[in-house]
Image (cartoon, helix red, strand yellow):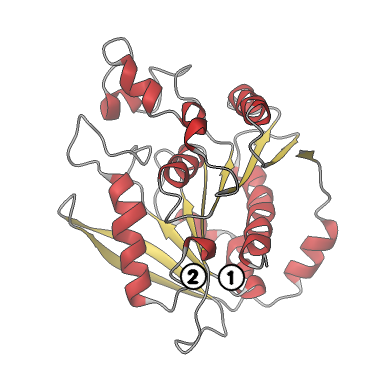
Amino acid sequence: MQKKWSLSFFLVLLFTYAQASKVDTVETVSQSMNKKIKAVIITPDHYVKSKTYPVVYLLHGYSDNYARWSRSEAVLQASDLYSMIIVCADGGFSSWYWDSPVDPLYKYETYVSKELVSWVDENYATIRSAKARAIAGLSMGGHGALYLAIKHPDVFGACGSMSGGVDIRPFPNNWDMAKRLGRYAEFPERWEKNTAINMLYLIQPKTLDIIIDCGTEDFFYNVNEELHRQMLLRNIQHDYITRPGGHTWPYWQNAVSYQLMFFNKFFNKK
């Protein structure tokens, strides 16, 4: 169902909280890529190791890095408000969160869905269940969040996309995707297989809570509209939000508040 919500009450509630969450920059290890990768871990002010907490993984967009989401006040305050751990993962400059069949140095599906999750579970007081794990991202990270959650429902029970490149095929020459998959003209099967919109058949009923958000002036708006139509056709339950806005940080600062509220509701489902 398409929703157009007002954030006024939610923002008043959110900003009554002092920004007291703790932000750690950590160094994780990827065995698959044989390198160390940084991440930011945000824990609520009241975090104690004697309790366990749900976890949201946030993915950045093309050409950005792990640190960008940690500068969002909405993200920092949501950790306290909802008593959740938030992991700001690194996906490289242009990984699209795939295990690249072209470049063995790009195995970010394995890194995020297995190596990073394992590292976080070993080093923080997490609830080790898909029912207490969500993943979301913007742009490249929006595609990555859907891609990883659909492929790994045993790891992530909920996912969200903000201004996501949910169908990569209309953009064969953009954002280094050809460097990760090979040229579309030469390897069309790779592009067909690794675009989120073509993976809907993998979603089993009632296995994944999904929220999608895209601005009406965004260059990814049309592919998000088509994804929404395809999900309705297949009776895949999801929240779909559109409102005026483009591919900008002011839009994502608003969108992430919806997504984190959505995940909190998911974590607290009976």
Query: Of marks 1 and 2, which one's residue comes earlier in the chain?
Result: 2
Secondary element at tag 2 = strand
- Pointer 1 local density, CA inside 10 Å: few below 14, some 14–19, many at least 20: many
Residue 214 at x, y percent in the picture: 65, 35
Q: Please, which residue is most extreme toward the left here?
A: 34
Residue 130 screen position, x and y as percent: 48, 60
Dot label at residue 42: 2
Nearest the camera: 87 or 207?
207
Which residue has dot 1 on it?
Answer: 79
Quadrant of the rendered structure where residue 100 is? top left
Judged from this view, the residue extending furthest toward the top is 185
| Circle 1: residue type | Ser
| Image quadrant in which the N terminus is located | top right
Given contact means CB atoms under 8 Å apart, are the residues at marks 1 and 2 in contact? yes
Residue farthest to the bottom, as pictured: 50
What is the quadrant of the C terminus in the image? Answer: bottom right
Few, some or many residues within 10 Å of mark 2 (<14, 14–19, 20+) = many
* 138 is higher (above) or lower (below) than 216: below
> Residue drawn 77% across and 62% down?
11
- The residue at the point 59 percent across, 79 percent down is 20
Q: Indicate the amino acid at tag 2.
A: Ile
In the rendered image, residue 9, in percent from the top left (x then y), is placed at 85, 62
Is 9 displayed left or right of 196 in the figure?
right
Q: What residue lies at 67% left-to-right and 41% top-to-bottom?
A: 237
Q: How far apart are the two marked residues, 1 and 2, measured between alpha carbons?
A: 7 Å
Q: Is residue 178 above or below residue 31?
A: above
- Image coordinates of residue 27 in percent, x first then y, are 28, 66
